Image (cartoon, rainbow, N blue to C red):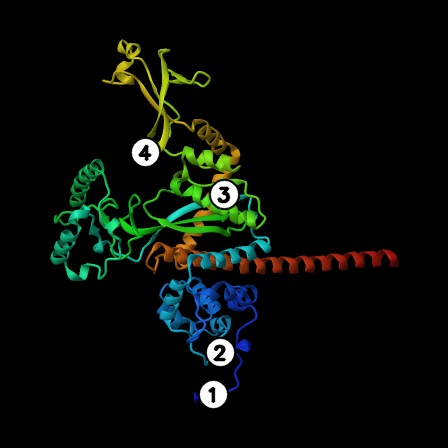
Amino acid sequence: MQGKKIYQEKLFSSFQLSNRVPKNNFYRRLKEVLDLSFLYKKTKIYYGSSGQKSIDPIVFYKLCLLGYLENIISDRKLIEHCSMRLDILYFLGFDIDEQLPWHSTLSRTRQLFPESIFEQVFTHVLSICIEKGMVSGHTQTMDSAPIKANASMDNLELKVPEEQLESHLQRVRYQSRPDRKAKVNKAPKKQQSITASDQQLQELKSRNLNWQKNQNQRPGASNNGAKYTSNKTHYSPTDPDARISVKPGKARKLNYHSNISVDIANHVITDVKAYHADRKDSQILQDATKRLKQRLKNQGLLWRNMLADAGYSSGENYAFLEKENLISYIPKHGTYKGGPEGFTFCKKENYWLCPQAKKVTFRKQKMVKNSLQNHYLTKRSDCKDCPIKQTCIGKGFEKKIGITVYKEEYERNNKRVASKLGRYMKGKRQSTVEPVFGTLTQFMGLRKINTIGIKQANKVMHMSACAYNLKKLLKFVTKNAETVTNRATNYFFVIRAQLNFIKQILST
């Protein structure tokens, strides 16, 4: 007999949310593992003693985590999504007839709590992973990637001398299209004023002409005149902390710099922070290392090996890591040569010997592009009638050698990188930290920063890393539980087989 379902709403119904969420559901298991009750004490100072009650701090942080677990970066869409999911309502502690907080409450609360609270949540999740045995601590990999800021390149303003600032802004705002300009200029006066030297401006001018010529010759490009933008000459009034960054083959964008550290044991993120996008990896390493080392020390873990790509390479960093008793496996940068070809270095007397057996003696130490170098020079008389002068110094009068003062640290690191263990460590780094960034940007809501300012961007990165670690944690716990069950089952069959064998012997 054919059935026919007719829907009719009941005035009263008996419904229990916990009965509808399966025992093996992800958010049900996450609710059992994640305890954020410490937030009540940590966030109490940010509220008054009277007035309307705010959103529960635990509910707020759970909603933030849900955004990255579900790969939703819009607060409005997140609330709509959560209200339709029974397992998420159970995770949040809401019943089906309770209304979730308004989406604007999330953004206001996110601005209310400082960065330190978000970092404490990240550290709490990391400590849970450490207690479960997921983090070894002895080998850490480090990498970085640009994350798109919540600002447009169309809104960029030109930096001008401070005395011309007001007149320039009035003229630009009058001439520009109103739909292309920022409504409010959030940048401070210092950032709106140009600070580049005359030499830097001249370099940018020549680079701008070459870049404009190359861009206009591309197929399909308009000949209206391409614009070259730089952090020395432009800034974003919408998000002053965002910086212009570019990678070979990619468009210039306003980004933030995300730097993470990952443990090689189970790919757990041990450190994350947002930096300005115009900073190099080598300028970030020391700050990230100090912070990570202290965090691992507080958790009772010993850090020994440091893995990173060539972007973190510098003599200062090699010396710093040796001082911190860390073994570095960082490939040298392409600009490091170790000395001129055919020249021999005499360490004891501190001079170089050229192919014609002439000394290139030490003269002074000098800062070159924020790097301290030893400078060596020959005598003009030695190079005057040299048979290889044309190929060695060209039209110069003496041979000049500039070499970093950290040459020995470079050589020790390069020797480790070229060893068999160094090649193994390179494979470990590529298979550990690089897939983590792909997961964060594609599946964990870190494809774009949906907030304004570097402090807010830092909060976003910490919560995305928390969501990633929690997924790793539940997968690790489930895998271990299955392993224990299989071992117990195998042990049972082995014992039974042994008992049967003994029974046969006794009966015989």
Question: In the picture, which quadrant includes the C terminus?
Answer: bottom right
Dot placed on the residue nearer the N-terminal end, 4 or 1: 1
Does dot 2 land on a helix, a strand or a loop?
Answer: loop
Of the residues tagged 3 and 4, which is closer to the observer? 4
- Say few, some or many: other residues with alpha carbon within 10 Å of mark 1 (under 14 / 14 to 19 / 20 or more): few
Q: Is residue 172 left or right of residue 493?
A: left
Quarter of the figure with residue 370: top left
Q: Which residue is mark 1?
A: 3
- Say few, some or many: other residues with alpha carbon within 10 Å of mark 3 (under 14 / 14 to 19 / 20 or more): some
CA separation in Å, label 3 and label 4: 32 Å
CA separation in Å, label 2 and label 1: 32 Å
Of the residues tagged 2 and 4, which is closer to the observer? 4
Please state the horizontal and vertical placement of residue 404, each as a whole percent of the image. Answer: 39, 28
CA separation in Å, label 2 and label 4: 61 Å
Does dot 3 land on a helix, a strand or a loop?
Answer: helix
Q: Is residue 92 left or right of residue 300?
A: left
Of the residues tagged 4 and 1, which is closer to the observer? 4
Q: Which residue is mark 2?
A: 95
- Say few, some or many: other residues with alpha carbon within 10 Å of mark 2 (under 14 / 14 to 19 / 20 or more): some
Of the residues tagged 2 and 1, which is closer to the observer? 2
Please state the horizontal and vertical placement of residue 310, each as a whole percent of the image. Answer: 40, 38
Q: Which residue is mark 4?
A: 369
Q: 30 above or below 145?
A: below
Does dot 1 land on a helix, a strand or a loop?
Answer: loop
User: Is residue 508 something one can see in this rendering?
Assistant: no
Please state the horizontal and vertical placement of residue 111, each as a whole percent of the image. Answer: 38, 63
User: Is residue 253 something one can see in this rendering?
Assistant: yes
Of the residues tagged 2 and 3, which is closer to the observer? 2
Q: Which residue is mark 3?
A: 428
